[in-house]
Structures are given as C-alpha cells and as structure tokens.
Image: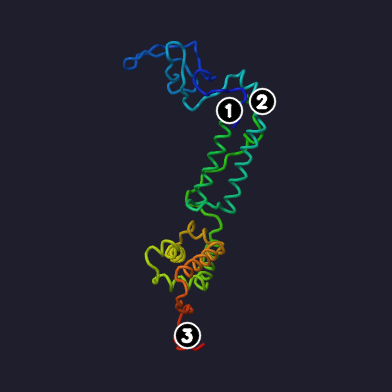
Amino acid sequence: MAKKNVINKCCENCGCLDKSRSEKKTIGERESLFYGCSNGPGGCSLAFSLDGKCDGCCGRWEATQEEKAKNKSMAKELGGQIKESFERWRYISIHGASDPAWEDGCNMNLVRNHILYGKRQCEALLLLEDYPEEYFLETPPEVNDKYMARVEEIRERSKKSLEAYKADSDYRFILQAVNRLTKQQNEQTHASAFLRYVSGLEDSIQNDKLVEMRRHENPDRYLDGFRECRKRIEEILGKSEPEPVLPMGQLSLFDLYGLT
C-alpha cells in the first residue's frame, strides 16, 4: 500500500508518542530513553537512544494528526481494498476457494484478517472524518477453519471423476504396463505417480477428505496426464508388443483369449 506522506513507521514519528513524559532507564549496560505512548504497553514507548533515535515500532503505530490530514486522498484506495476483501470473503463462503491444501474456513478467516488490517490502516493513516464508508461495514464473523462450501457438489463431482479415470483406456494401459518398466523408466514416465492420483482420490472419497476431492472436480487435467504418460511409456517400450488393455470388471473368456 502506498503511503504518500509516511516514510517510515517507527516510534520516532508515531502520533501516539508523548514526549512531554520521559524516563531514562538502564537496561543491561545501556542507558535508554522511554517516552509516554497512548498505545504502547504500559503507556510507554519502545526504547530510544539518548539522542532521540528509535527504529522500532510496536505494531500500533499511527500517523500524527497533521500527517493524517495530508493522507485524505488515501481513503478511496483503502476503502477499495476493504471492499475487495469483503467481496472475496462472501465469494468463498458460497462458492469456495481453489486452495489445494486448506479448507475454505481457513481462507475465509485469512480474508477476514485482511479486512481487519484494512480497517486498522484507516485508523493509523486517516482522520476519523475521512474514513471510507467500507470501514463502517460490519466485520464478518470468524468461522470454523474446517468449513467447506459446496460439500455435496464436491462429493458428487469427485465420484464422477473417479469413474471417468477408471474407464479411461490410457489409465488402464498405464495400470497394466507399469510392472514392465524399470525403476528408472517408471520415474521418467511418472507412471506410478499417475496411478496414485486415482488411488489417492479413491481414499479421499472413502474418508471424505473434501479438500483433496475438490482437486478432482474437473477430471480433464488428469485425463490429459494419463494420455501423455501413455505416450512416454510407449516410446520407452518401443516396438515391443504391449499387453492388451483389458476392460475393467468381470472378464469373459472372449476377453481373456482375445476372441472379441
């Protein structure tokens, strides 16, 4: 975020600093100067050197009233950032996020923190009368980290993806060819890794791991991967006649002896 009139956040230029109150203290072998602070722990600033320098900041820094008056033009930008976070929070609550590792609740709470941070920036940089209207919107509640949107939809789509994988001829080819590959060839083609996508999804469905299941809502990416993996296997195996790709499920004599 651009801060046009504030170069460095530190106790030295903080609007909460009260230099009318000061006290010298010796900490270890160093003598330091402490001023009053309306936001600091115990009403005290961080340590200053005796020549009045301080590079630290307690995290509750605020611009001086004069600086806040100069920052009026920042209100629109700050309000826009808060509004964007509100919209993102609402979107995740309904449609979910696309995070491959974390539940929607975690992402909603993260965005909520962005909203709180944006409001804190308004308090630190602007006069009250210049706060954007978005500042006064009610902050969304904190939600359970494990919350997931579209639960039933994710379950249904992941099951359909698993069916598509198991019916795919390229996947079945990899399944039957993998044992013909050396360890090095397996690593080159990533054959076992592609098979684990399917077994992993099956495990996720059985154990209702929604985040993992969500990765498979669109099976096209994985089906494309199966196709590319098969090409690499065929290139490595060369002209050797591959074993026939048998259909999944119960086999008939016609399937076993190639009479179809």
Q: Is residue 84 above or below residue 174?
A: above
- The residue tagged 1 is 123
Tell me which numbered mark, 2 or 3, is placed earlier along the sequence. 2
- Name the N-terminal-most of marks 3 and 1: 1
The kind of residue on which mark 1 rests is Glu
Sequence order check, earlier mark of 2 and 1: 2
Question: Which circle marks residue 93 in the picture?
Answer: none
- Of labels 2 and 3, the one closer to you: 3
Indicate the quadrant containing the N terminus: top left, top right, bottom left or bottom right.
top right
44 relative position to 164: left or right: left
Residue type indicated by callout 3: Asp
Q: Residue at x 57, y 64 (%)?
A: 220
Looking at the rendering, which quadrant does residue 65 occupy? Answer: top right
Residue at (48% x, 58% y) in the render? 212
Which of discs 3 and 1 lies nearer the camera? The answer is: 3
* Element marked by disc 3: helix
Q: Is residue 25 left or right of residue 126?
A: left
Residue 62: give x, y in percent of width and height.
55, 24
Q: Which residue is mark 3?
A: 255
Residue at the disc numbered 2 = 72
